[in-house]
Amino acid sequence: MIHIFIGTKAQFIKTAPIMMEMTRRGLPYHLIETGQHAALTADLVGEFGLRGADTLLRAEASNIATLGQAALWTSDTLLRLLSSPDRLAEQIFRGQRKGVCLIHGDTLTTLFSLLYAKRCAIPVAHVEAGLRSYHYFDPFPEELIRLAVMRYSDILFAPSDWAMGNLGRMGYGGKSINVGGNTVVDTIRFARARYSGLERPGEPYVVVTIHRVETLYSSARLNMIITFLEEIARQRRVLFVLHEPTRKQLERFDLLGRMQRNNQVEMMPLQPYLKFLDLLAGADFAVTDGGSIQEECYSLNIPCLIMRAKTERMEGLGENAMLAGFSRGRFDEFLKVFPNLKRRGTNLEGISPSSLIADHLQQYLESHD
């Protein structure tokens, strides 16, 4: 049995093509959801035509959106680890301690799923392994989570030569497999066959999404971003896709009204994923602090300004993407050069990382039956 853990929207999006490939092959899997982004993942199930979670570890159907909720969820999750391995296996893995546990990324769900599987002596395969910022506390806690997960996982699926090189330098080359790309490539291939462009604005526009904690809890950073968006809005429409924590922090720092009063800025709630990708595909460029959108822009060949000081992802850097570092000079430079920022020399059409991951998981199960 393949046990698959998800908790966040991004994890579902990037794991969905693996689950679709398993379904196509008749390869059974057991989907476990931690409930980190419960409301968002529930919406995605229908978009991808997948079944819902087989095991839910959090009863609430809402997202974890505040630090208080995150602290409570974390404590509940850690307390569950005090159960005996047999009891934990019954609660989470349907009593099955054979097979492999597939985990993704660098979130708290990633760390907790590793701990659960190891407590039950189930081998762990980590998707999107080998990403490094080489700064322990930037981004935090993701860099530390990655280090722990890569060390203790049994199989590491690297999305690139660069990630594979990182794993080799860390001494993990013997358990690493290069799948040639991020699984979001398969997600976007699935989405492209289903969007039409009919809902895009009839004028030049940019897509903006900001959600990282280190951005939202810094008044100076949010002020800088809002000022920059106001400058963009003088020349093109701004579609600001708002996470609920982002809205709350903009209100807290008296910045939400500035955006709402600007006729060139459209404040949008989180969109269905396929619609969001459609909007992103038609944008002049994107402004984001999210790593997943950086990867999506790379796959779509859309210029992207990354509102972070450090990133663990190389996709697009020096090609279609620019790291802003919260520098006014970088903002101005991006506005001048973005029409020339394009992906160079990488053909993503012929690869399917999800198929390769399914291949290796199937082989692993057959060899360990």
Image (spheres, helix red, strand yellow):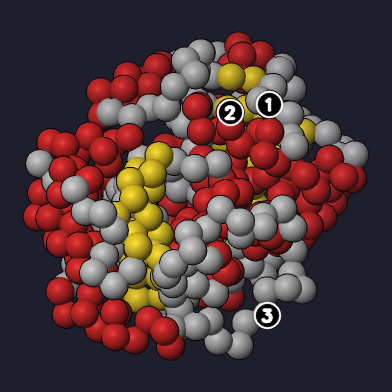
Name the amino acid, label 2: Ala
Image-based side of 4 in relation to 211, left or right: right
Q: Where is residue 167? Give x, y as percent.
A: 52, 66
Residue nearer the viewer, 351 or 145: 351
Q: Is 40 located above or below residue 14 in the figure?
A: above
In this orientation, does residue 42 appear?
Answer: yes
Position of residue 81 measured from the top left corner of the image (x, y, whole percent): 47, 20
Q: Residue at x 51, y 33 (%)?
A: 40
What type is the residue that disc 3 sits on?
Answer: Asn
Is any part of residue 154 visible from this angle? no
The reply to whether the C-beta atoms of the residues labelled 3 and 2 are less than 8 Å apart is no
Nearer to me, 100 or 214: 214
Q: Is residue 31 above or below residue 269?
A: above
**In x, y percent, where is residue 244?**
33, 35
Of the pair 201 and 252, the residue shown nearer to us: 201
**Classed neighbour count for the residue bearing mark 3: other residues with Cα under 10 Å, few (<14), some (14–19), many (≥20):** few
Question: Distance between the Cα atoms at labels 1 and 3?
Answer: 33 Å
The percent coordinates of residue 304 (x first, y second) are 40, 70
Task: Find numbered disc 3 in the image and state the secondary structure of the residue it sits on.
Answer: loop
* Residue at numbered disc 3: 347
Q: Secondary structure at mark 2?
A: helix
On the rendered structure, is 207 left or right of 249?
A: right
**Quarter-of-image position of residue 369:** top right
Of the two numbered discs 3 and 2 on the same chain, state the one appearing first in sequence.
Answer: 2
Q: Which residue is mark 2?
A: 42
